[in-house]
Structures are given as structure tokens and as C-alpha cells.
């Protein structure tokens, strides 16, 4: 029996193709073929839909630097503000380059309640990667206010309908909707006083222009520690950050709980394998890291708990905020 080579007609097709490539000098090393399938294969962008320097930038830039070190490709943070954040979100939803990510806030779940056509559906046009951090919204008053606690706040609101005022950073913001949810769930009449941003809202509380304000810890913690402000309640479902401050849900059980959260998304065609890769590479930031330290500085907790909790939160919050905005009579633009 001959031990020579089999006739060409009987060779497997893949071997015949390889022979043709070799003969033509076109053979591609196996390692290069594998590299072509790797992600990222080029510099990646992380779009932040707000102006530079805000709280949303902090985790985005830490994550970008971390991923660049781990994956060997640049990750560039690009601030693209406008339309209440919709402009930047839309850019990611419509991205087709395979290397564009979004780092945004809980406002992404609010936008459909405020805009008739934001240019995207956050439930179908974005792929959840993970929440990166969360922070409770606090109901605060000035340090010398006669409103000593949350029970006192509710009692006065019920006794004097429409006279107890609260400030927020603007109509339709997450903090505004936290107040509107309190109005609806507690069945009280409150006076909303919107300001152009968190800093003016906090200043209004300190100056006594309003009775209270819904604000994030970054604006109020220094004032609380100095005695210039007092926290009346925590809008999250459970006590956090300030253990002595009750959660609204302890007193009003059907209050859904509101947090300011930050999250990483991809466009709708992002493969599951890329999501898994990102979570694998981001895992070291969950423990002691520059991210957990910086988030603690602004009263936030690092999460990085994967796509499922973020997807569940989006499914719950998008319809929730639409119903709260409609009940409050907030018009869609």
C-alpha cells in the first residue's frame, strides 16, 4: 500500500484552500486571525452626555484609564452635552463603529418622560453593561429649620397644604421627580421651586428661600457635617450613607425609592461577548480602588454588578418616571 500523498481531489477542502494561500504568499498566521476577532481592535470612545467636570465624568475617566491599561487600546472620554443628555445618548444609540460606549446617569430612564422623541428608545437601543455607582437623594433643610425631622415635614405639609416648599435643580430632573413621587405617594400638596442647577438649589435651602430641597450628597454632605443643613429623609429604599436618617419608604411604604445612579451602556448591536469582556476587566475596580475611593468622596457606592441589575432597573424606571411625570403635569417637549 502506498504511503504517498492522497490525490488532490480527495484532500479536505480546507487543506486545498490553505495550499492555494501558501502558494500565492497570502497565508495569515493563526495569531493574527485571532487578533482580528479581539475587542477592542481600535481606540474606543466613552461618551458622557453632559459638560466636562461634572460628577458623571469621575467614574467615566477612571474607567477609561483602567480599560486602556488592561486592554492595550486608548479609551477616550468624549463629552457631548445637549438636550438634557439626549444628544450624547442618541450618538451612542446610533453608533455603528463597534467601539462606542455611553457613561450616563439615571436621567437616561427619565428622558422618555420629558421628550416626545428623544431619538432613541433606552430599552431597545442601548445594551446594559453595568451600573457603575449609585448615590441616595436626600431631602434636606437648613440647620436651624423648625422642621426637625421627616415626620414634622409631613405633619406641616398636611396641615398647611401648598405652603411647604422644596427646591430642585430643575423641572424634570431626577430630584424633581423624587419630590413629585413624595407628593403623590404621601398625598400631600407641596410647592416646587425649580432652580438652574444643584448649586443654586442648595444655596436656596441654606438661605431659607425654601423649606427643604431634594439634593445629592455631593452638594449637601459638607453642609450636613458642618451643621448648616439637616437631612430629613433618604429617598432610597433603605437607609444608606447616613444611618440615622430614615428612608422615606419606612414611613410611606409605597414610595418606590429613588437614587442617582451612573451606568455604562453600549449600542444595541454590542455583542454579549464584549459585555462579558468589559465586566471581566472592570472587576478589579469593585474592591479597594481609585474608583471606590473617589465615589465615596461624593457620597456614592461603587457597584459594577453587571448587565442584569441595570436592565431590571431600566425596565422598572422608564415606565415609572413616565407615570410620575404625567401625574405631575410635566409637559413633554
Image (spheres, rainbow, N blue to C red):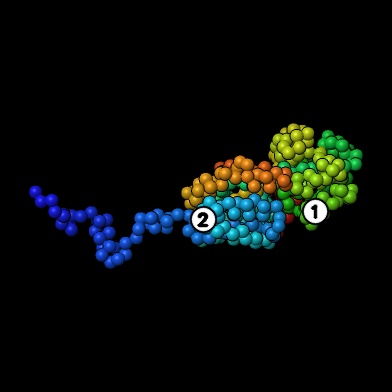
Q: Which residue is mark 2?
A: 72
Is the residue 132 above or below the residue 78 in the image? above
What residue lies at 26% left-to-right and 63% top-to-bottom? 20
Residue 106: assigned label: none
Secondary element at tag 2: loop
What residue lies at 67% left-to-right and 45% top-to-bottom? 293
The x, y position of residue 248, in whole percent, is 76, 37
| Image position of 24 (left or right of 266) | left
Q: Residue most toward the bottom? A: 24
Front one among 225 and 157: 225
The x, y position of residue 197, in whole percent, is 78, 55
Res 179 seen here: no
Secondary element at tag 1: helix
What residue lies at 27% left-to-right and 59% top-to-bottom? 18
Q: Quadrant of residue 22?
A: bottom left
What residue lies at 68% left-to-right and 61% top-to-bottom? 82
The x, y position of residue 15, in whole percent, is 25, 56
Whether label 2 touches label 1, CB < 8 Å: no
Q: Which residue is mark 1?
A: 199
Give the class, few, some or many, for how many residues have Cα within 10 Å of label 2's Cα (few <14, many ≥20): few
Is the residue 207 above or below the residue 83 in the image? above
Amino acid at each position: 500500500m502506498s504511503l504517498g500523498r492522497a490525490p488532490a481531489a480527495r484532500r479536505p477542502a480546507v487543506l486545498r484552500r490553505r495550499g492555494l494561500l501558501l502558494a500565492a504568499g497570502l497565508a495569515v498566521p493563526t495569531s493574527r486571525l485571532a487578533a482580528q476577532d479581539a475587542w477592542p481592535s481600535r481606540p474606543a470612545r466613552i461618551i458622557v452626555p453632559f459638560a466636562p467636570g461634572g460628577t458623571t465624568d469621575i467614574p467615566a475617566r477612571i474607567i477609561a484609564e483602567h480599560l486602556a491599561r488592561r486592554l492595550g487600546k486608548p479609551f477616550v472620554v468624549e463629552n457631548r452635552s445637549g438636550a438634557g443628555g439626549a444628544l450624547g445618548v442618541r450618538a451612542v444609540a446610533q453608533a455603528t463603529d463597534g467601539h462606542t460606549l455611553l457613561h450616563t446617569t439615571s436621567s437616561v430612564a427619565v428622558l422618555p418622560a420629558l421628550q416626545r422623541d428623544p431619538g432613541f428608545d433606552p430599552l431597545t437601543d442601548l445594551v446594559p453593561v453595568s451600573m457603575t455607582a449609585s448615590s441616595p437623594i436626600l431631602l434636606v433643610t437648613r440647620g436651624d429649620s423648625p422642621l426637625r425631622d421627616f415626620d414634622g415635614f409631613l405633619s406641616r405639609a398636611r396641615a398647611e397644604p401648598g405652603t411647604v416648599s422644596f427646591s430642585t435643580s430643575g423641572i424634570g430632573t431626577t430630584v424633581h421627580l423624587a419630590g413629585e413621587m413624595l407628593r403623590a405617594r404621601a398625598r400631600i400638596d407641596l410647592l416646587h421651586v425649580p432652580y438652574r442647577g444643584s448649586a443654586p438649589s442648595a444655596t436656596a435651602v441654606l438661605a431659607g428661600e425654601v423649606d427643604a430641597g431634594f439634593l445629592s450628597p455631593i452638594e449637601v454632605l459638607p453642609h450636613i457635617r458642618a451643621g448648616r443643613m439637616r437631612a430629613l429623609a433618604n429617598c432610597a429604599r433603605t437607609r444608606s450613607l447616613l444611618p440615622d436618617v430614615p428612608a422615606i419608604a419606612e414611613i410611606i411604604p409605597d414610595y418606590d425609592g429613588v437614587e442617582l445612579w451612573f451606568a455604562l451602556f453600549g449600542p444595541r448591536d454590542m455583542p454579549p461577548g464584549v459585555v462579558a469582556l468589559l465586566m471581566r476587566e472592570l472587576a478589579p475596580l469593585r474592591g479597594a480602588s481609585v474608583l471606590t475611593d473617589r465615589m465615596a468622596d461624593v457620597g456614592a457606592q461603587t457597584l459594577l454588578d453587571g448587565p442584569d441589575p441595570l436592565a431590571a432597573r431600566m425596565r422598572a424606571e422608564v415606565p415609572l418616571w413616565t407615570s410620575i411625570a404625567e401625574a405631575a403635569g410635566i409637559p413633554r417637549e
